[in-house]
Image (cartoon, rainbow, N blue to C red):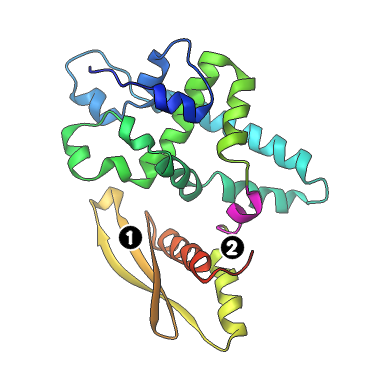
């Protein structure tokens, strides 16, 4: 197994690993582990751990930062922050996929840019940081990469409703068209486009039609530059 150079990644994370073996595991997809003749562990257990830490830290931070919000509002806000789209956008921008160990087949089918895998990497790296440096460093990672510009990120959860209200206020209507469906039955990828009065705007992809439409709506909101 050829080792990655994590120097640039550690600078981005603001954390220097004492044991970089944790990062090797955090970036090892199960397809690579299954294909390898070596005894290699995938990131699945780290992802499991990272997910639990993420839920706890985000819940705590939102509870402290927004004393005026109800339980329902906090739950909604947390869901928007820890969803696949938000986490995958962060790791895509930071190029986590470039460090990923994938099987040849997964790499050929675009695994390094697949949102579900990029979302997994946010959590597996979090798990690795916790194992290497403890809860304080894990919290720093979450605060630095996720808990900034919360109001903007929170709009994803209600993107379709926000776009609908805006479009209706202008006397227009919005609809979503399914552009394509790809992938095996157990891992379908849908692509939809947001259309305002018949004009196509932004596209979105997801593992469900609803997610694809939500992404398309969110990207359209950003393009139209409203709802700030």
In the image, residue 27 above or below residue 180: above
Residue placed farthest to the bottom in the image? 171
Crowding at mark 1 (Cα within 10 Å: few <14, some 14-19, many 20+): many
Q: Quadrant of the N terminus?
A: top left
**Residue that sits furthest to the top in the current view:** 18
The magenta span reads 149-156
Residue 181 position, x and y percent, is 27, 62
| Marker disc for residue 86 | none
Q: Can you identify the residue that label 1 sits on?
A: 190
Can you give x and y, in whole percent of width and height, for residue 187 in the image?
29, 49
155 is within the stretch colored magenta: yes
| Dot 2 crowding, Cα within 10 Å, few <14, some 14–19, many 20+ | some
The residue carrying mark 2 is 158
Residue 38 or residue 99, whichever sits in front: 99
**Which mark sits nearer the N-terminus, 1 or 2?**
2
Majority secondary structure in the magenta region: helix
Q: Is residue 125 left or right of residue 182?
A: right
Residue 130 in view of the camera? yes
In the image, taking residue 148 as reference, residue 114 lies left or right, namely left
Residue beneath the point at 61% across and 77% down: 165
90 on left or right of 31: right
Q: Position of residue 97 (x, y in %)?
A: 34, 36
Residue 48 appearing in the image = no
- Image quarter for residue 117? top left
Do tag 1 and tag 2 residues touch (Cβ < 8 Å)? no
Query: Looking at the picture, does residue 155 appear above or below residue 105?
Result: below
Instruction: Give the structural element (helix, strand or loop) at label 2.
Output: loop
Q: Tell me which residue sits at (43%, 65%) in the image.
A: 216
**Percent position of residue 95, x then y:** 38, 38
């Amino acid at each position: 197994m050829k080792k990655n150079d994590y120097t640039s990644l550690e600078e981005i994370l603001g954390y220097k690993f004492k044991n970089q073996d944790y990062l090797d595991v955090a970036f090892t997809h199960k397809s690579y582990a299954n294909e390898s003749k070596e005894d290699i562990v995938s990131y699945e257990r780290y992802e499991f751990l990272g997910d639990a830490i993420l839920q706890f830290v985000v819940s705590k931070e939102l509870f402290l930062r927004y004393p005026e919000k109800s339980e329902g509002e906090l739950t909604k806000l947390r869901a928007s922050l820890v969803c696949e789209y938000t986490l995958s956008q962060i790791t895509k921008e930071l190029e986590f996929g470039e460090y990923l160990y994938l099987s040849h087949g997964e790499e050929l089918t675009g695994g390094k840019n697949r949102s579900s895998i990029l979302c997994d990497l946010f959590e597996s790296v979090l798990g690795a940081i916790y194992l290497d440096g403890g809860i304080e460093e894990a919290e720093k990672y979450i605060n630095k990469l996720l808990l900034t510009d919360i109001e903007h990120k929170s709009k994803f959860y209600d993107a379709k409703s926000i776009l609908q209200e805006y479009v209706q206020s202008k006397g227009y209507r919005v609809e979503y068209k399914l552009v394509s469906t790809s992938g095996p039955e157990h891992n379908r990828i849908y692509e939809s486009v947001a259309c305002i009065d018949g004009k196509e705007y932004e596209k979105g992809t997801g593992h469900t039609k609803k997610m694809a439409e939500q992404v398309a709506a969110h990207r359209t909101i950003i393009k139209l530059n409203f709802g700030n």
